[in-house]
Image (cartoon, rainbow, N blue to C red):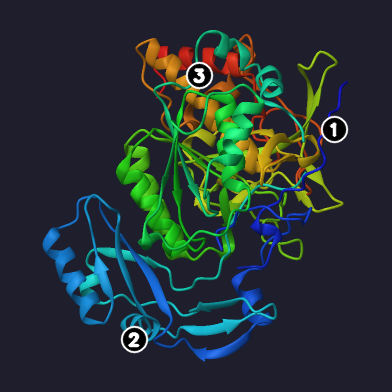
Amino acid sequence: MKFRPALLALVVCVSSCQAPAGRSGGAGPTPTSRPTPTLAQAIARAADLGPAGASTTVSLDFGLRTTRPDKARVESALTTLNAAGLHASWRPPSSLIIADGPAPAAAVLLGVRIEAYRLPDGTAFYASLGQPRLPATVAAVSADVSGLDNYRRARAYAVRPGGLAPGDVLTYYNLKPLRDAGLDGTGQTILLPEIDDLPNLSDLEKFASEFGLPPFAPLVTVKRDPNWGNPQKPQGEAALDLEIAHAVAPGAKLVVYLAADDFGHSDRAFDQMVTDHLGSIISESLGSCEPDTPSGARNVYASIQDRAVAQGMSHFVASGDSGAFTCGFDQDPAASFPSTLPTVTAVGGTSVFESEQGVYFKEYAWGSPLDQSGSGGGSSLYYARPDYQKNLVVAGGHGLRQVPDVAADGDPSTGFHIVFNGRDGQVGGTSASTPLWAATTALINQDLKKKGMREVGVANPALYWMGENSSRLDPRPFHDVTAGNNLGFAAAPGWDFATGWGSMDAAALDAAWVRYIKGGGG
């Protein structure tokens, strides 16, 4: 057994390690990834400064009931919102009416109190704990609104310190046969929602040069919009996602959508990403405690994701880095949103061990009780068990959506080699396993298109078919992880709450996908 601890110089974590300010991401000196406090916990710790004043701008998103709303009704809703003192707009085929304006105007319009708060560390935020009432003209076209608080619950799922270089990744997960067959992601585009900035490509180009990969510059597009708010300062999350994706699929284009880390702004960027439809694969390393995600925010996001599904997009989402306790270890076990959506593929994390030859030896479910980190997993509180999971009989499932679906290397102590701030380092987290799966899908899509077949699209029906029929597939597409735990659930033969079906044997996964589609799947 070969273990690679050599590159432990650079500690990289995300904003989940920092002050509890929304959708989270980043890099810093703290080696742990503690859950962000819930909104209720933050309010309990904060000073209530009274009603938010006119200088506080709220960014509201009203999710449309249908993808083809009556334009006259939309115009009526816009008139109501603008008359209330907000600046509202809608551009088809967007799923959102967006409306920005002073907090008092929004409060009157929706019949709620919007309070201003300040945490002991100085972090300021606003929030409304009331249930909004939509005016009749708005309710005629929209059922949900998000953006009534800017408390930053979500975080990017990457954690701390040199590990698997690109060549190691290709060998370990049996990606090399696909690359040797000429599959490099050419013709594919991976879309990445990010909340930490990417001011230049210097780290990326250093990574590419170090490992003999093509330059990033011709492949990377960074999109910004004032309506999406301001992303955090560079934290390392965007660099991590892009470098891992490029290591696996160096011919794929990469499009980054930068937004602020609150639901209102990040949903707008996500909506535009689906509207632009520049590629068919989404890699998302963001998430928030599912019980602490407002229903309006969940429903608005889900309506946008439904459009992505209709367009045949594959969406991979990190399952989280706090094991079974995404909301905190003083809270009940809970999973991370949006990984709990039935229409996305939730990616968990493992600890990896190479053989002396550098090939696959074994994996454990990632769970580290010392720093309370591990592969996110568990049962949703809100989403019913989808049809593709109907054959799962797992204690604790309760007839609800269960995550993760699959997994890959996530443990920081066995993580990936990246470059950030000009330095080489090692990172882990489900932020790392997610772009690995997304980039592997780019290779599979490329192969399917060469064979005249449809692309992967929504991946879960095929993945669960493969998992349930693995004994008849030779070689098997998954490494079944049967040891370890995620601090709440133990890995076991077959599907489990720690690693889903397990990690990939990429060449076998590609062959299984061809077989699935030829057999009429999907």
Q: Tell me if label 1 and label 3 are in contact, CB under 8 Å.
A: no
Q: Mark 2 or mark 1, which has the lower sequence index?
A: 1
Residue 58 drawn above or below residue 210: below
Residue 519 picture quarter: top left
Q: Provide residue 291's location: percent of width, then percent of height.
A: 58, 62
Residue under numbered circle 2: 108
| In the image, farthest residue toward the bottom | 50
Q: Earlier in the sequence, mark 1 or mark 3?
A: 1
Q: Which amino acid does label 2 sit on?
A: Val
Q: Which residue has dot 1 on it?
A: 6
Answer whether labels 3 and 2 touch (C-beta < 8 Å).
Answer: no
210 vs 191: above or below: above
Q: At which x and y percent is residue 3? A: 86, 27
Q: Distance between the residues labelled 2 and 1?
A: 59 Å
The residue wearing badge 3 is 184
Q: Distance between the residues labelled 1 and 3?
A: 28 Å
For the residue pair 103 and 113, the one nearer the viewer reads as 103
Q: Are marks 2 and 1 in contact (CB under 8 Å)?
A: no
Which quarter of the rendering shows the N terminus?
A: top right
Q: What element carries label 2?
A: helix
Amino acid under disc 3: Asp
User: Which image quarter is the C terminus in?
Assistant: top left
What's the distance in space between the residues labelled 3 and 2, CA to CA?
Answer: 54 Å
State the SS at label 3: loop
Crowd around label 1: few <14 · some 14–19 · many ≥20 (10 Å): few
